[in-house]
Image: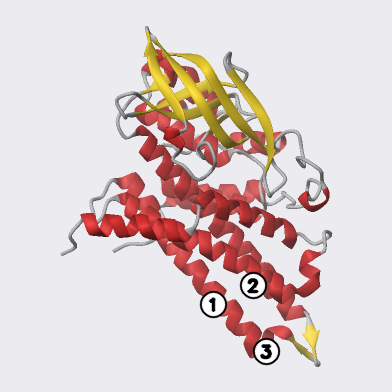
Amino acid sequence: MDFTFTEEQQAAAEAARGVFSGVAPDGVPSPAFTRGPVADDFDRALWARLADADLLSLLLDEEHGGAGLDAVALCLVLRESAKVLARVPLLESSAAAAAVQAFGGPEAKSALLTRAGRGETVLTVAAHGRTGHDAPELAVTARRDGSAWVLDGVQTAVPWAYDADLVVVPAHTGDDRSVLALVPRGHEGTSLAEQTSTTGERLGELRLDSARVPGRDVITADGAWDWLRGLLTTGTCALALGLGERVLRMTSDYAGQRSQFGHPIATFQAVAVQAADRYIDLRAMEVTLWQAAWRLDSGTPGALPASGDIAVAKIWASEGVRRVVQTAQHLHGGFGADIDYPLHRYHAWAKHLELSLGPAAAHEEALGDLLAAHTLS
């Protein structure tokens, strides 16, 4: 087995490190002391730099101006973005564009993909359902009306909803199928209510009241939503890994400098053991992430469907990122809560990622169902 990344994947990660090298994680007001959102928009300057570096078109084919790379390459870039808390819809826009490319019709592809790859059109995905706990595709109904589709329902906590040009909305039909509707911001029959994440970023509750969407803007292909959801989830695990790695590095640096009783606290066994446990968490998060990304993109058959590998990655990511930041706060002491030090921001972002992934127990139950349904030889 060859577990090394390809030259193209490594080049994407290196380009990402170059773009993100000048990003300060405390570039906006602290969410701890800001009433409402920390900013009115995402980092447009960083978005432009990502476009110039061809990092917004990684998953797009050459005919759409892309590099034709895979989910592993995207996760490598997302991992770097999380280390600096990059305030851009990189995951959502890239995943939505990839879904349009894989499952959309020719009109949607020609209208969106090239512009999305250049950063001129920004996409996001309504992936949290009505409450954040129910299935997103069941939160909105879609029914045919002539050549159009009519959507009714509510999607909560839509990231970048006030900034994106299009929202990809999963919905279910009367015959129990899932479709994806491309809904423009401000479209007739839609409204937004402001919500705020633990990160301080502005989210939107999207309400659809008999919103009519042309048939060309609705993806009806079987498996489209499952594939998009898998890519979003895997990308979120990559964000959790990158954030956790930066936090553990911050903790290591601090513990090597902070002295008690005349010695750096890093030399104390209790501190070293806690840091080692978190290192093990990160390595488990990493190996399960690459397994999930590889299965999702390659379609390689396995003992379980790719959703099983994604469930394992979610279990490690949701619990692992929480343990890493909690240990970091503990070892930093009161210094970790200082608003002039960025650790409290990483803690807030980690909580958002944990909530986005959902509780590990739910993923363990889903994994158990898969194991019960597939006999392992």
Is residue 106 among what the camera can see? yes
Q: Residue at x 34, y 50 (%)?
A: 307
Q: Residues within 10 Å of mark 2 (few under 14, many from 20)?
A: some
Counting residues from the start of the chain, the first of labels 2 and 3 encountered is 3
Counting residues from the start of the chain, the first of labels 1 and 3 encountered is 3
Q: Judge whether 162 appears above or below 111 on screen.
A: below
The kind of residue on which mark 3 rests is: Phe
Image quarter (top left, top right, bottom left or bottom right) of the N terminus: bottom left
- Residue designated by label 1: 277
Viewer-closest of 266 and 314: 314
Q: Position of residue 69 (x, y in %)?
A: 42, 41
For the residues labelled 2 and 1, the Cα–Cα distance comes to 10 Å
- Residue designated by label 3: 268
Viewer-closest of 65 and 40: 40
Residue 327: which disc?
2
Secondary element type, mark 1: helix
Left or right position of 62 against 38: left
The kind of residue on which mark 2 rests is: Thr
Q: Nearer the viewer, mark 2 or mark 3?
A: 2
Q: Judge whether 284 appears above or below 263 on screen.
A: above
